[in-house]
Amino acid sequence: MSECLQERINRVYGAIQLPQIFEEENRGFFKCCDPVLVLGSNSGDTWKNDLTSVWIKLSDPTDTATATMYKNDVLFTAYTFIIQNFPNEPNAIFSTVFWNEILNLGGPGCYSIKIEYNISGIQGNFTWGIYDLKPYSISNALGTARLRVKLNLNQEIEGINFSGANVQDSLRFRGFIGDRQPNTEIDNLIYQNRAVKTVVRENLESYIITTDPLSDEFIKKFTQLYLLSENELFISDYNAHNADYFINDVAAVVEETAEIDYLDRYQRRSILTCKVGDRKKNKRTYY
């Protein structure tokens, strides 16, 4: 009996994950992409300057990805993205756009950010977002509110460990942040003579985030990123009718789950509300 010798080669291929790109079907209620309003200012006030971060997870050190800026669908060569690595996530990169820099370089207008990638030999591209850039002014900001976040946690939805990176991002939206309530907690002590004396009184201030009717594209940014993955959250409001004009990058934390009101069933917009509170609980007096 003759023996048949076979040469076998063992190769290991790591699993790859490509960016998920979803294109809506036209079912009769098709909507175009809503541009995000972004404002920029030469002021040092953080609530007058919006920023946007982009990121992508690659599969291998040989994979590549680039981010490019377009103005009115024309390549905007005046700006170059500064690519950074995540300290605790191999093969993932991010970059942060400060919109006041774009405003100084190209002025106001319609901008878009596009990502091109080569992951394990598979090439592709997608649009990260479309932005309506304007200079900061009271009139341009009226009717809006803003969330600014620092992402510094292990984010399972993205499959990226943001820890140690402190990636900043912001979302300006049509809506309102206010309805401040002190929520005072009172702890008194009744003595034998029936006199009441204060032990501790503490204000646990809260605010309500309420959006205007927004598309699902915006609502998911709230529920799947800004109110879920933030390590630090800062709230700002720019409405003329707000009783409090001092909600300017107030450090906050989510205190109750966000709720979505889908309004009329035969339209595609919805309203999100969420209760947040002061991050620092230091407004108290005690004996």
Image (tube, grey):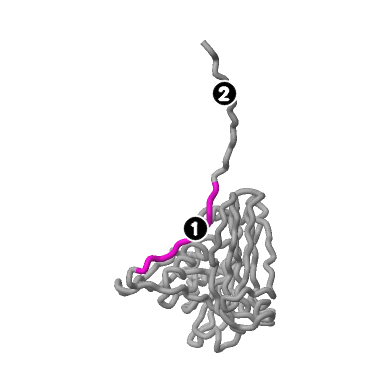
Residue 124 lies in magenta, yes or no? no
Residue 192's label in the rendered image is none
Q: In which quarter of the image is the C terminus?
A: bottom right
The residue depicted at 61 percent of the width and 83 percent of the height is 108
The local crowd at label 1, few if under 14, some if 14 to 19, many if 20 or more residues have their Cα within 10 Å, is few
Main SS of the magenta segment? loop
Relative image position of residue 124 (x, y in whole percent): 55, 59
2 or 1: mark nearer the eye: 2
Q: Which residue is drawn at 61% across and 78% down?
A: 47
- The region drawn magenta spans 16-26
What's the distance in space between the residues labelled 2 and 1, CA to CA? 41 Å
Q: In which quarter of the image is residue 83?
A: bottom right
Query: Picture quarter containing residue 77?
Result: bottom right
For label 2, the residue is 6
Q: Single out the residue that lies furthest toward the top.
A: 1
Question: Of the numbered discs in the image, which one, if any, rests on residue 20?
Answer: 1
Numbered label tally = 2
- Does 74 sit left or right of 24 as displayed? right
Q: Is residue 287 visible?
A: no
Residue in front for this viewpoint, 271 or 96 = 96
Residue 112 seen anywhere in this rendered image of the structure? yes
Q: Residues within 10 Å of mark 2 (few under 14, many from 20)?
A: few
Which percent across, then down, holds residue 89? Answer: 63, 51
Image vertical order of residue 173 relative to residue 124, above or below = below
Location of residue 278 in the rendering, given as x and y in whole percent from the top left corner: 55, 69
Query: Which residue is drawn at the image coordinates 64% and 75% (left, top)?
Result: 76
Residue 19, magenta (yes or no): yes
* Nearest to the observer: residue 186 or residue 145: 145
Amino acid type at circle 2 is Gln
Tell me where residue 133 sits by quadrant. Answer: bottom right
- Amino acid at pointer 1: Gln
